Amino acid sequence: MCGIFGYIGKRKALSIIFKGLKKLEYRGYDSAGIAVLLDHKIHIKKSVGNIDALADKFNNTKDNSIISKATLGIGHTRWATHGNVTVNNAHPHVDYKKNFSIVHNGAIDNYNELKHDMQQNEYKFYSQTDSEVIVNLINQYYNGDFFYSVQQTLLHINGSYAIGVLCKQDNNKIICARKDSPLIIGIGNEENFLASDISALLPYTNKMIFLENGDIAELYVNNVILKKLNGQQKTLNICDISNNINNISSNKKKYKHFMLKEIYEQQYTIKQTYEKLLDTHDSILQICYNIKKIYILACGTAYYAGLVSKFWFEQFTNIPTEVNIASEFIYSNAIINQNTLIIVISQSGETADTLSALRFIKRKKCTSIAVCNTFKSNISLEATYVMYTYCGLEIGVASTKAFTGQLIALFIFALNLGLRRKQLTDIQHKEYLKELLQIADKVKIILGNTINIKKIARIFARKKSVLYLGRYINYPIALEGALKLKEIAYIHAEGCATGEIKHGTLALIDRTIPVIVIATNGITYKKTLLNIEEIKARNGFVIALQNETNNVLIKRIGFTIYVPETIELLSPILNVVPLQLIAYYTATFLKHNVDQPRNLAKSVTVE
Ligand code: AGP
């Protein structure tokens, strides 16, 4: 939530900051702003809307030609937390004396108390944000030493932050700092950068410093000084990240939207992930050998990946596995000890609910594994072990390729753990792997035939509500299909266990409400056919996902989407793909902003 970017160097800062913000726009897009420092004056432009709206504002201002000369500045793209979407609430913020300017990603818990105290001392506030309190506090602590004033401020605030700060008096540096929100410094040649993620820095440099919690840094044109919050200097740990990024690019290429690109990339990201993860690290298998219980914690789509994987862990390893919504887990009385394994799943590695659940269990001294798509993110750093999914940056807010990447990682881990614990024989292990290795090509087949999918999406675009049904290991896929439709098409959708609808939801069935039923082969197939009959008997409009070998349904239902056959345990990885595409095309027929759905943001860094 929220993206921040900063530049100091010899080039013109404005266009570099614009490009950086454009890359970070997926993190928040309700308003944006840029501040540059020129001749000891801070110039700020902000606007409601996305980065293009901000660019229009710049193009239409008189002082544009002056501002564009600046060689240092900071920018922000916002997802509103404190205060609604207005120009006043957009960042950068300045203190009431206009000495400092700040961009902030995070949330300050004690801002109300601090604000109240400052208001007693003539301080004035013009926004409803917590961030404006930080910048005024910096001004309050200022005694001619920029670093000291930021340091003191950070010692007095509680909460999460990644900040970039400009000081009118001190126009040769930017100060930045982080706690619990991501911040990376990019090291250039006679220029330095700061950004919320790698993608915004990659056009300029591969040399990066991943700030740790409690780090505070001074960025100069030719130097970076890194300190702990207590002022103690730290050595710069500069990573060359060329080896840690994969070849999945973060450009839209020929695709109209990132989401569509990311859906199509699954044929590669699935392969890339299993190739990298086939051999689970020995130390992980070793430590998991005596595990007696697994808890999986995650949110949204990642939670559904966890629900699918429960069946794999229980079948392959014989370890009872419970899947929990991360934000709820912290209230549970789960018994956690050294024989418990916690798996947290998060694409971004930043999700506050998941992070806080991870911190909650860390106090109980059990082993934790993060399944994560973002290199050096909070969650990946704080878990005992990390298994990266190799999907490349996911920009569309609706998660697609990260989901299938998570499934691949979890399947392989469950399989390898099962083998290690001797619950699976070598032959069984090999058979499962053989099936898995064919999945990417089968995804490609689905992606190659979207005629029926588009027809269905046209129908959905006129509907108010859709039901998604699945049984057993495909029940979570019904939930995921429904989430995708809600998220980007803004159509009410409900995922149900197929066998459960006769206990209530069946009352909704009539001609007007489409029902997508996952009816691919497996132990649930016969029962699912029966359930389809029950829906038909009530004039329901059924769309079925099935395998070609079972075309008995074709004549008697509204639409059929064929998916290639695989073993039932792996069928979720294929079945989800048409559901992603249905949501995508429905949203595009409705002319929605698919990559940036209303009210949402990619990384949810508040609880
Ligand atoms: C999925 O389409 C969503 N945007 C959302 O549910 C997401 O999966 C959830 O917020 C968890 O995010 P994470 O994987 O980055 O932790």
Image (cartoon, rainbow, N blue to C red):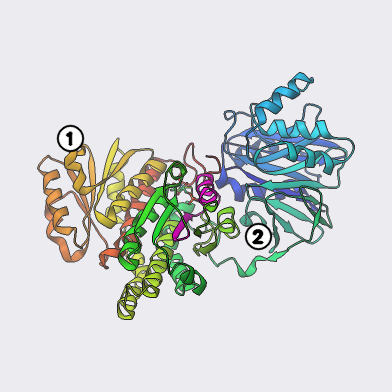
Q: Which residues are magenta?
A: 338-361
Q: Is residue 72 left or right of residue 416?
A: right
**Where is residue 80 drawn, in percent x and y?**
57, 34
Q: Amino acid at mark 2?
A: Leu
At 67% from the left edge and 36% from the top edge, which residue is drawn? 91
At 31% from the left edge and 78% from the top edge, which residue is drawn? 425
At 16% from the left edge and 63% from the top edge, which residue is drawn? 550
Q: Is residue 108 above or below residue 577?
A: above
Disc 1 secondary structure class: helix
Name the residue carrying label 2. Answer: 202
Front in this rendered view, residue 383 or 486 = 383
Front in this rendered view, residue 156 or 478 = 156
Q: Is residue 17 left or right of residue 24?
A: right
Q: Earlier in the sequence, mark 2 or mark 1?
A: 2
Name the residue carrying label 1. Answer: 507
One can see residue 262 in this view: no
Q: Is residue 568 left or right of residue 21?
A: left
Asked whether 352 falls inside the magenta stretch, the response is yes
**Where is residue 346 drawn, in percent x and y?**
49, 54
Asked whether 116 falls inside the magenta stretch, the response is no
One can see residue 405 in this view: yes
Disc 2 secondary structure class: loop
Q: CA distance from mark 2 to mark 1?
A: 53 Å
Q: Amino acid at mark 1?
A: Ala
Quick one: label 2, few (<14), some, or many (20+) residues within 10 Å? some
- Count of marks, rendered view: 2
Question: In the image, which is nearer the foreground, mark 2 or mark 1?
Answer: 1
Q: Is residue 293 above or below residue 123?
A: below
**Where is residue 137 drawn, in percent x and y?**
76, 32
